[in-house]
Amino acid sequence: MFCAFDGRRRAWYRYPDSEKLLLVFTLNATGTLPPVQTRSNESSYDLIPLANRNGYVNPEDLIPMPQCIAQQDQAGWLSTMARCTSKQCTRHFGVICTHHQWLTQLSCLSTEFSPEMVGLYLPVCSRSVLAKAQLFHWIHNITGRMWLVNVGDANGLQSLSPLSLTKGYAAFEVTGKAPTCLTESVVDASIEPFEHVIASCAFTSDTRHTGNADRPWEYRESLRSIVALDTETVGYELTGRTITRGDYFDKRCFCDTFSTHKEAQLCPGPSLASTKERLWLNATCGPDSLPADWTKELQTTAFAYIAPPKWRWPQHKGARSKKMTRLVDHCTTDACDIDSDGYCKVERAVDRACICRNISYDNCEGPCRDFEARIDFVNWLHDLCGNVEGWHGLPKHWRQLTVPTSVEMIPWRWELKPFRKPDSGNPLWKDFSPCVSTEWKLGSVILVNLVTLLAGLCTRPGQSRAYPLASAKQQAWILSGLATAAIYLLANLGISVHATVGCETLSVGQLMLLLCSMPRLTWSMIFLRISNPSQETTLHMVASFLVAEIILQTLSAFPMIQTINYGIEHKFYDNWMARLQTEPAAQYMYAGAVMWLIIIVASLALLLQVASDAIAQPEVRKRGHASAPIVTKAMDQVNKQWTWFEEMVARKWVDRSWDPEREPLVHSGTQDYGTLFTNDPHIRRTRRTTARLTIIIAMSGFLLWVAQWFFWSGFITLSAEGFCPPKLYLLTAIWVAASIIVTKIWA
């Protein structure tokens, strides 16, 4: 026996003892055909009455051949029916027969289709419960017997349900997802091809006919045998349910028959065909149909291969190279992407093992000099190859490469330390010494602040009277402030020039601007001047300190804004500085820079508001309504307390330090009304404005001092050996002398 398939998947089987080709099963039949002649209603069966002529019936009145019989050598089945078919007289004229017809004797069929004869076909028909039920219906219709071979072997076949298909069913189209090496294989025990096993387990959504449904049988005198002109496919309707129209096969039927291939290597591997075979058998029959290690060396996009939608390059463009791009093209091949049903869907994918065999951390080379590119490349490489067996492409300390180093957290790329050995013949190197400790550098900054405070405490106000800012002595406080800032800048310049000996790449200007951002106790000078109103405190003393501080804060804006920009560029401020959690000193430095900027912006906004209030005409404030919100009432209370504080400062400091004899005269027309005291509203508003400006500047100076301490304590700790200004205490000595001299001269 052999079989062949035409273009419509129609199976034809030829038997050696017959020259006749018989169509036994059509897998893709179309059109709606009449239903079977047997009607089942759970456990009861209604037999369609046949046209009985004294125990004989026309062959075409018999129900068509069952599917499982048509799929086997039906010669014995046909000969059995032929033995019960004979030529009978169906019309008489007296004693003369006027018409003969080939009829089949029912009692003969009941005898000839004995359990022994049915048993010859039962092994194939028993593979699928649906095929066995269809055979039982045929035997019961013909013989009235309630069993097939042995009594009780048809129990449960009378009323099937979807649960009768214990492993379920699959659409016939899934056979197209199986590799050729599987579909062309043969079952060893029965030498049965894959397609025939599938056909023996197949069924359709509803019963269909593969021939002449109106004339399923015919007796041919030339062959002296009855011939099947129609066969019925097994329909899912035997379960009492309906499914989508199509062709299916019973999974249990196929898997039990094909189980002899469990240990066989039908598709040698590792290969794409072997992967398709294992996935197909697993999705169809489950893992029990495969060896225990069947998942080993699968070419799937689950891990071993990466599908194009899941492929990810390093986000940083600097971490990519032409070599990596060519390598990906070289390692792209076909692999299985597992669909929702567990079958293989072939698509192009990147072989992970191929990539990892040819790539390591050394491939980053130049791009990894940028720490952003390095971090991105190391994380990408670890995610790609970290779980590949036998791959060791990352250094042992690779985790340290995934975070910025302390040097990389500093916004500028220069360092302040001698990188050449001191030359005893060069007098410029005579003062060089090893870098001092972090504690000493922080102590030097503290010493600068203490000396500034000491200079303010040692300075006594002169005997001259204080003049308003608009007086002829106006230039005094401006020159004093400029002189103070100039001396401070000269001190920074001296240290910067001295520090750059042997460091040709270091910019004197950058170091000088950085030193301008050091914390200073200038704000304490202002509080010292306004804390003792009994003395003749001069406004120009406070103003001179403010001028110097404004100049130095303006210059310190360059390193501060550079730090903020660097932090934003490298996402140091994201998620509450989570990227800097390994270096608390870096968090202090970047937090101090942001605090400095916020305080500067807020101070400028307050100063502009004070200036606009001084210029604008006083307006009568409207009283709030009783129904004002709680927030508005709270703000009114705060404003009331702040106004009281301003009045107190103006009364205790400005009014007492202002010479009443030099108050301007109030004129009305051309007449002078003489000298007035501070009851004049305009004068009081001016003094209150002066007090407000002083308070804002003093508080802003204190907050800026705190922010600068955050910045510098973090910077000095973070830079460690990278910031070694030679003899930083020189700045202290220069600042001591400058502060005392300037305050003495201009007091």
Image (cartoon, rainbow, N blue to C red):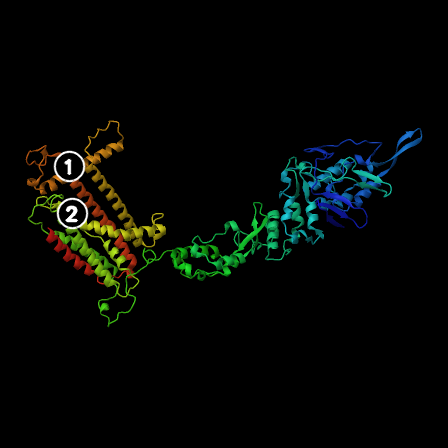
Whether the residues at callouts 1 and 2 have beta carbons within 8 Å, the answer is no
Lower sequence index among marks 1 and 2: 2
Residue 305 horizontal/vertical position (percent): 53, 54
Instruction: Report the residue that reaches farthest toward the right.
Output: 95
Q: Amino acid at mark 2?
A: Ala
Crowdedness of circle 1 by 10 Å Cα count: few (<14), some, many (20+)? some
Vertically, is 424 above or below 738?
below
- Give x and y (percent) for residue 625: 24, 27
Q: Taking 207 as reference, is 219 left or right?
A: right
Q: Which residue is mark 2?
A: 543
Q: Which residue is mark 1?
A: 685
Q: Quadrant of residue 713?
A: bottom left
Q: Residue furthest bottom?
A: 425
Report the front residue among 605 and 382: 605
Q: Quadrant of residue 665?
A: top left
Left or right for 499, reference 179: left
Q: CA distance from mark 1 to mark 2?
A: 19 Å
Which residue ends up furthest to the top in the rendered image?
A: 626
Q: Is residue 34 left or right of residue 671?
A: right
Residue 497 position within the rendered picture, expressed as x and y whole percent measured from the top left: 24, 62
Give left or right: position of 8 versus 410: right
- Label 1 SS: helix
